Image (cartoon, coloured by chain):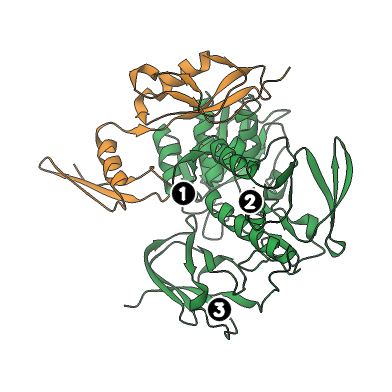
Amino acid sequence: MKDRIVICTSCPLGCRIKVSVENGKISISGNRCRKGYDYALEELKDPKRILTTSVKVTNGEIPLVSVKTSSMIPKRLIPQIMSKIREIEVEAPIELGDIILKNIMNTGADLVATRTVRRIK
Amino acid sequence: MAAALGAAEQGVEVLLVEREDRNGGVLNQCIHNGFGLHYFREELTGPEYAERFMKLIESRNIRTFTGAHVWKLAPFENTAFIVSESGIYDVFFDALVVTTGARERPFGALMIPGDRPAGIFTAGLAQRFVNIENHLPGKRALILGSGDIGLIMARRLTLEGMEVVGVVERLPYPGGLERNVQQCLVDFDIPLYLSHTVTGVEGKGRLEKVYISEVDDEFKPMKGTEKVFKVDTLILSVGLIPQTEILKNFVEIDPKTFGFITSNTGRTSLDSVFAAGNDVIIYDLVDYVSIEGYTAGKHAALHALRKATPSRRIPIIPGENIGVLFPRFYEEQEDLRIYVRVRKPLENVRVVVEPGIYSRKFDRVAPNEMITFTIPSEKIPPSSNRILVEVKKDEG
């Protein structure tokens, strides 16, 4: 395999990390922290992302509550997780940090609310 | 909110006026993550970042007035005129901080030939529809402009079931952060057309077709490079314009960017008026906006308390390769945090501040990633006539 440049998405610095594989040995350079090293390694094996999206709300001040996965999930599962999320609906009030879905598709990550939605009426 | 916090911590009475029902501005619709790494040492989504600040200001002597609009300011009479559902108010102040942010450059400013159908949205408007109001703007979209909001919306619309056929950028490099190119476009196989622009839009009632072409070095479309996309939606991410109209006849405004011209304390050309955030320059990160907001609030409070008389202002001059520079004046009662955007991508350069107060080497710099650094006030000779910021080729 040739050298590959991976743009680390762990934080907005966006380090350009060089990953090269030679005779089964992986060498990683250009990262500015440990997170970057781990990221580059994962990116080679099974890329992972935090998913942020929204969930329908009934009786809320707005019709949606923003949510995120509590930890990184495999990128390949995003389409399936999105169709699951599209089916659910929660009732206001919602507090920031409320768990909307537990252990989504056995990833170990929960779907948590990222804002407060007050109840109206 | 950061300005209110910075002011309240000096012990003054603070009124925070917000047009919407909830504080936080555009953060509330930026449901993606990437906020807060500098300010809170933690990665947060926009609404989480906003709620962190709501908690911080709740614990202080700050009155917030939401659903209220400042329709006029009379800075010489130290008065703000406010309209709200509950009535009309004249508010008197000793110092004012203006944190009105920026607006998106609209479609009308681009002078793109063709029809004027429905289906053309700025990225922020589309973002509000999708993330707050639960409406999808269309079925198939093309995005013009590769700024961060454009990239984020490419991913967001894809996740919500729209087909995004591409992102078009007239420059030869992307406008947004590298990580957003990766996680918003590459992750979802959305093509990025660099050195391309939209040359026409067509549609009766609703948008039907968008024409794009490759551009030359002067951004002129080249013959024979035209492509046509059958889309019902065009999303624009073509830049932000500081919102400074409310004070345009009172304080100095940069005629090119429309941003307020301020010193490192946030002070404008009027001693009692301060400004911070995207109404001064367009920042990369909300964390920077909060830091400068906090600083402006602090110095506004000191002004209100008559604790600090404005010191001599040393002008800060943008030199070689500098596109955007903040601040434009230095006052000695605050350290000098400089924010710089270069004009074009460069390699092996040195960022230098004269008279000999800062020098640092960079392997790569690019306009989409702001350079920021702090020079402690003790290092700046008070007798300096000017401070010059430059990005030069590194010789050694």
The colour of chain A is orange
| Mark 2 or 1: the one toward you | 2
The amino acid beneath tag 2 is Leu
| Mark 1 or 3: the one toward you | 3
Discs 1 and 3 lie in a common subunit: yes
| Mark 2 or 3: the one toward you | 2
Left or right for B109, reference B283: right
Left or right for B91, reference B198: right
x, y percent for residue B386: 59, 81
Secondary structure found at label 1:
loop
The amino acid beneath tag 1 is Leu
Q: Label for residue B387?
A: 3
* Residue A4 placement: quadrant: top left
Disc 3 chain ID: B
Q: Quadrant of the C terminus of chain B?
A: bottom left
Q: Which chain wears green?
A: B
Left or right for B132, reference B340: right
Secondary structure found at label 2:
helix
What residue does disc 2 label?
A: B5
* Residue B30 placement: quadrant: top right
Nearest the camera: B96 or A72?
B96
Query: In this view of the protein, can residue B170 be seen by the observer?
Result: no
Q: Residues within 10 Å of mark 1 (few under 14, many from 20)?
A: many
Residue drawn 51% across and 46% down?
B225
Q: Residues within 10 Å of mark 2 (few under 14, many from 20)?
A: many
Residue drawn 54% across and 69% down?
B335
Label 1–label 3 contact, CB within 8 A: no
What residue does disc 1 label?
A: B177
